Image (spheres, helix red, strand yellow):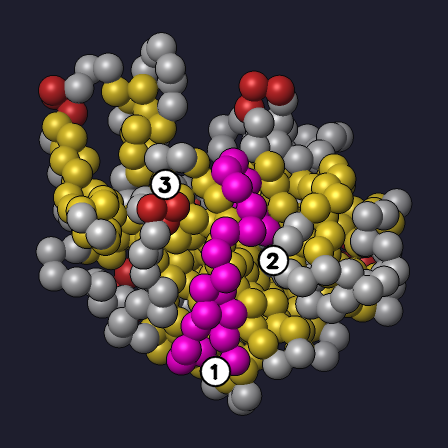
Amino acid sequence: MMRCAENPLLTVRDVKPSRPGLCVRGIFNCGACRFGDQILLVCRVAESAGDSPREVAVPVMRRRGAGLRMELLRLLRSEHPELDFSDGRTVLRRSGARGVVCLTSFSHLRLARSFDGVHFRVDERPMAFPETEEESWGMEDPRVTRIAGNYYISYTAVSARGPAVGLMRTRDFCRFERLGLIFAPENKDVAIFPARIGGLYYALNRPVCPQFGAPQIWICKSPDLVSWGRQRPLFSGAGLGWGGLKVGGGAVPFLTEKGWVEFYHAADGRSRYRLGAMLLDRDDPEKILAWTKEPLLRPETEYEKRGFFGGTVFTCGCVRDGDRVLLYYGAADDKICRADFTLDEIFRALRH
């Protein structure tokens, strides 16, 4: 494995705010694909309305009349002893019906373009901006799947109802068709396989049910990419000494001579995120053939250990380049980086 010498490839300094009065807190967790002679990253861009130790100020979309309008939510820390502000990503209730009151940032999707896969230019305007009640807290963690000339972008739609999963489609990255929600709350980390298998489409997803145990990666099927069912648990991360808190899918799976390779993330009890890989059967991806018992990528560099949420590496996208895999990943929830693997490195790390 080799980290790109130019890391981090993108930081907040490379991104213009989506509108006056907002400041960019992070660009990270990007889907990736080839488009013509370019590599495109569909990036998550997180914004807030300022940074103050006294308050949390975050934009949200609220219904006003027939439509949604962006408004500013302000919470003074001193006036809300019932709230827990200790996690930089969320504001929680301390007791009673404990849950998320709001996020500390508001995310949209933005395109970045490169001819060499290293030097990227970020579009000045959002590619997609929240426009439904299910997206009223933002759009996060996009993944891009190319199927028959169409690019399908799955993303987490966040609201007070919890995280759901939306889908959009494009052929040219100029015009986008919204296909609606494909997974209801609480679900996220959806990665759609780039081909039919046995006549059906497959997708990885991660339902969340914290009252009954830790999250797991599930796999499901669809005849049309919109209606998903026949869910089955696929991978719990049991036995991983480094992933007891969370596990979820990462980049869109890609096919090799040995089967489908899928990068996944896992987090320990201290919320340190690392990346591993698994190998799924070519003709039946519900079968795991092997997986990595140790991380392929862990937060070790300064730019991975320090940031908005330090100690985090998280991927939503990779690009094949012959026998190399260009893995694009979010570092510390505020930067985009790249690490390169050979297929042989990945296969040698797998354990049956």
**Taken as a whole, is the magenta stretch helix, strand or loop?**
strand
Q: Residue at x 56, y 67 (%)?
A: 152
**229 to 246, vertically: above or below:** below
Rendered residue at 27%/67% (across/down): 15
Mark 3 or mark 2: which comes first in sequence? 3
Tell me, for residue 77, which label it has, or none: none
- Find out whether the residues at labels 1 and 2 contact each other: C-beta distance under 8 Å: no
- Give x and y (percent) for residue 185: 50, 38
Let me know if residue 298 appears in the view.
Answer: no
- The residue wearing badge 1 is 172
Residue 159 tag number? 3
- Magenta region, residue range: 168-191
Q: Which amino acid does label 2 sit on?
A: Val
Quarter holding residue 87:
top left
Quadrant where the C terminus sits is top right
Q: Name the residue under label 2.
A: 226
| Quadrant (top left, top right, bottom left, bottom right) of the N terminus | bottom right
Pick whichever of labels 1 and 3 is earlier in the sequence: 3
* SS at mark 2 in the image: loop
> Within 10 angstroms of label 1, few (less than 14), some, or many (20 or more) residues?
few
**Inter-mark Cα distance, 1 to 2:** 20 Å
Circle nearer the N terminus (1, 2): 1
Total labels drawn: 3
Q: Do the residues labelled 3 and 2 touch (CB within 8 Å)?
A: no
Quarter of the image where one finds residue 320 = bottom right
Magenta stretch: includes residue 350 = no
Identify the element where label 3 is drawn. Answer: strand
Q: What element carries label 1?
A: loop
Report the amino acid beneath label 3: Ser
